[in-house]
Image (cartoon, coloured by chain):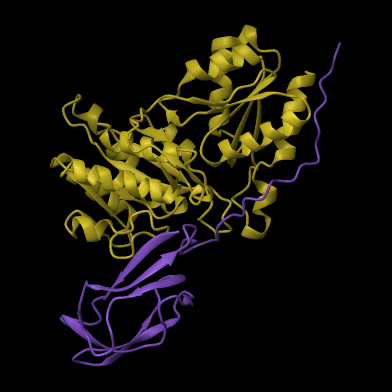
Amino acid sequence: MTEFVFRLPDLAEGLEDAEIVEWRVKEGDRVELNQLLGEVQTSKAAVEIPSPRRGLVKTLHALPGDLVRVGEPLVTFEVEDSQPGVVGRVPQEAKPARRVHLRIRRD
Amino acid sequence: MAQLTLVQALNQALRHELREDPRTLVFGEDVGRLGGVFRVTDGLQEEFGERRVFDTPLAESAIVGSAIGLALAGWRPVCEIQFDGFSYPALDQVITNLAKYRGRTRGRAALPVTIRIPSGGGIGGPEHHGESPETYYAHTAGLKVVAPSGPAEGYQLLRAAIRDPDPVIFLEPKSRYWTKEEVDAAAAGRLGQARIVREGTHATLIAWGAMTARCLQAAEAAAEDGVELEVVDCRSLVPLDVDTLSASVRKTGRAVVVHEAPLTAGFGAEISARLMETIFRDLKAPVLRVTGYDIPYPAAAVEAAYLPDLDRILTAVQKVLDY
C-alpha cells in the first residue's frame, strides 16, 4: 500500500482557495475512481470533487466551513501499489500453464 | 531495502537524479500534472517545479527535438514517449539528429538524452500500445538501447542511462510495471552488462525486458522435468555483452533467444549471429528463437497467443536438446 496525497487542484483560472461545503465520504471509507468525495465552494461556483484514485480514505484534511488553498492537502488516500495505467490492465501473476514436458535423451 | 514496484523504482530513480543534478529535466506528454499515464513521474512536478518537470504538447518529434536542443544548451533531458507505438513520429529526430550529433561534431557535442518508452505487450492495450521497437533503435548507430527486466534493474539502469553522456533509449516493460522486488537505492548500475539470473547446465535462455520473467518461469517448469536451464538477462542490447552471453552458451552448448518482437530481423537474429561468430565450435545445436509472429501486434483478446509462452519456449528447448 502507498499513501497518495490529493491536493486541492486549481479549479478555475486564478482562484486561490475554496471552502469545503460538505464531505460525502468519511475517513476509513473505500472509494472508487471518480466517486464523489464532496463539494467545495469557490468565489465563482460550487464544485463537486471526484476521487482521483481508487483506495481508502485515510485523512480528510479540512472540515466543512474550512478554507483550503490551492495546492494544500485535501485528502490522503491509501492506494494499492498496482493501479492500472490510463490504458490497459494490470497483468495477473498466476502460475502460467504448460502442456509441454521435456525429455532428456540418453544415448 | 525497500520492496518497490517497477513504477515506483523508476519514480525513485528519476527523483534521485533530479535531486542530485540540477541540470536534469523530465518532460513529455502528461508527465507533469498527471504524473504519467502509468504514474512513473508521480509527484515529481510537485517536488521539482514546472521548470524541471513539465508537460509537452502531443508531438513526439517536438519532444525529442526539444531534448536535443536542451542537451546542446547544457541540460540533461529525460523525456518520455507515452507508448511504444507513438515513438515512430519521433524517429526522424532520433535517427537524423540525436544519434548522429556526436559523430557530426567529431565528438565535441555529446547529447546526454534519455528517452523512456513504455514498451511491449501483455497489458491488453489497444493498437499502438503493445509494440517492441528495440530493433529500430539497436540498428541506429549512435544510440544505446537499454531494456530492464524488473524493479531493481529498472532503478539502477535508469540512473546509469541518465548519467550516460550519450543518447539512451530506455525501454520499460509495461507488463512488469507492477512487479515488486527489493530495490537497493545505493547500488550503481552500469550499461552494457548482461546478468545470469538463473544458473543451469542443459541450455541457455536469453531474453531482456518482460521476457526475462517468462524465461524464468520456463526454467522453473523445465526443472520439474529434470532439465536445468540457465537464464541470461541482456539488460542492454546496445552495447551488447557478448562475452557473458557466449560464456554461458559455451558452458551449456545450446541457446534459445526469446523476444516479444516479430521474428524477422528481430534482435534475436543479432544474438544468434554473435554466438555463431564467437563460439561456433562449442554449439551443440543451432541457436533457436521464440518470438512474436511476423504480424502487426494483435488485438488484446488474442495477445496471449502472440506472446511467447511456456509451451513455445519448452518446445524450442526440446529441439535444441534433441539436435
Give the side of residue B155 with respect to residue A84, left or right: left
State the image coordinates of residue A64 (x, y, percent, origin top left): 28, 89
Picture quarter with the N terminus of chain A = bottom left
Residue at left offset 33%, top offset 65%:
B34
Residue nearest the observer in this picture, B80 or B269: B80
How far across and down, in percent of the image, does residue A59 sit? 35, 73
Q: Residue furthest front?
A: A28
Query: Residue B13's quadrant in the figure?
Result: top left
Nearest the eye: B97 or B170: B170
Q: Residue at x 44, y 64 (%)?
A: A79
Quarter of the C terminus of chain A within the rendering: top right
| Colour of chain B as rendered | yellow
The residue at the far left in this view is: B73
Q: Position of residue B25 (x, y in %)?
A: 22, 48
The residue depicted at 20 percent of the width and 45 percent of the height is B19
Towards the viewer: B84 or B106:
B84
Which corner quadrant of the image does residue B21 belong to? Answer: top left
Where residue B71 appears, as percent x and y from the top left, is 19, 41
Q: How many marks?
A: 0
The picture's colour for chain A is purple
Visible residue check, residue B126? no
Determine if residue B176 is in view: yes
Query: Is B119 above or below relative to B160?
Result: below
